[in-house]
Amino acid sequence: MTKPNPSLNEAETFVVVLDDRLQELQRELARHEGAREAVATTLAEAEERAETTGNEAEILDTVLERLTGMGKVWERKFQESTATIVSEGLSLVFGQELELQIKPSTKSDMSAVEFVLVKDGQEEAVMTGQGGGYVNVIAFLLRVLLIVAARPLLRLLLVMDEPFAQLSQEFQEPAAEMVAALIDRLGFQVVMVTHERDFASVADVAYSFGMAGTATQATILKSKGVAAS
């Protein structure tokens, strides 16, 4: 008999709630089609830059920039939904209560917003906390949030290179369970390059690549949910 997996159960619960919130957000987005298209275009451009530079902060900066430029009513609703979703995802992966706050601020006499992470009533560094693990999870969840809420259904695909590279080993399993639950519930696909076997274990298809002399050799680790013998 298979032993229950607490992290998977928690991930599935999180995704059910996330799905409800995303549907509500999609209805709100539908009333702001121009902003919806702008979000999708800006995010796509940021993802291309992030893939080229390896700078995950690019995604966070893009979301902040887009939030700043939106109408106040829609902006507030989007901020609240984003903060709640990301907070719950962070708490799930790191096993403790973490709250992401999106606060209004001023930069160069211009209105802006900033991300603030709160743990046990104290502010935590977003960019460097957990050795960069926080920003890995936040950037991934923002990608999921915007790809599902702002993109046409035929483009529900994320191609990612080491998205959790700074995440400590102890948090890899709950992160992998969260990714698997998100994909299953929200109906999109992820193609991920990673050195972490926890993500291969929850994938439908997984390959391992290595060198055989001067040639690259691919080994099937898993195909259609069945691990290779």
Image: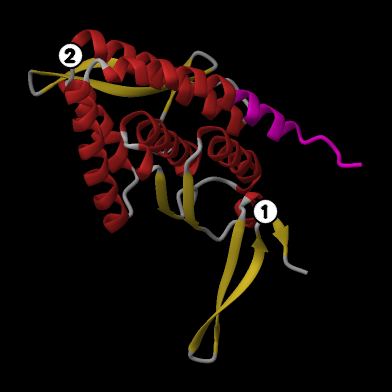
Task: Decide which of tag 1 and tag 2 comes sooner along the chain.
Answer: 2
Most extreme residue toward the top, as rendered? 73
Mark 2 surroundings within 10 Å by alpha-carbon count, few (fewer than 14), some (14 through 19), many (20 or more): few
Residue 159 visible within the image: yes
Front one among 161 and 120: 161
Q: Which residue is mark 1?
A: 201
Q: Which residue is mark 2?
A: 71
Task: Give residue 114's position: percent from left, percent from top.
Answer: 28, 23
Q: Which residues are magenta?
A: 1-14
In the image: residue 97, left or right of residue 147: right
Q: Secondary structure at mark 1?
A: helix
What residue sits 49% from the left and 48% below the top? 164
Examine the rendered structure and indicate whether residue 131 appears above or below residue 108. Answer: below
Mark 1 surroundings within 10 Å by alpha-carbon count, few (fewer than 14), some (14 through 19), many (20 or more): some
Task: Give residue 122's position: percent from left, percent from top.
Answer: 47, 17
Quadrant in the picture for the C terminus: bottom right
Task: Give residue 150's position: percent from left, percent from top.
Answer: 31, 31
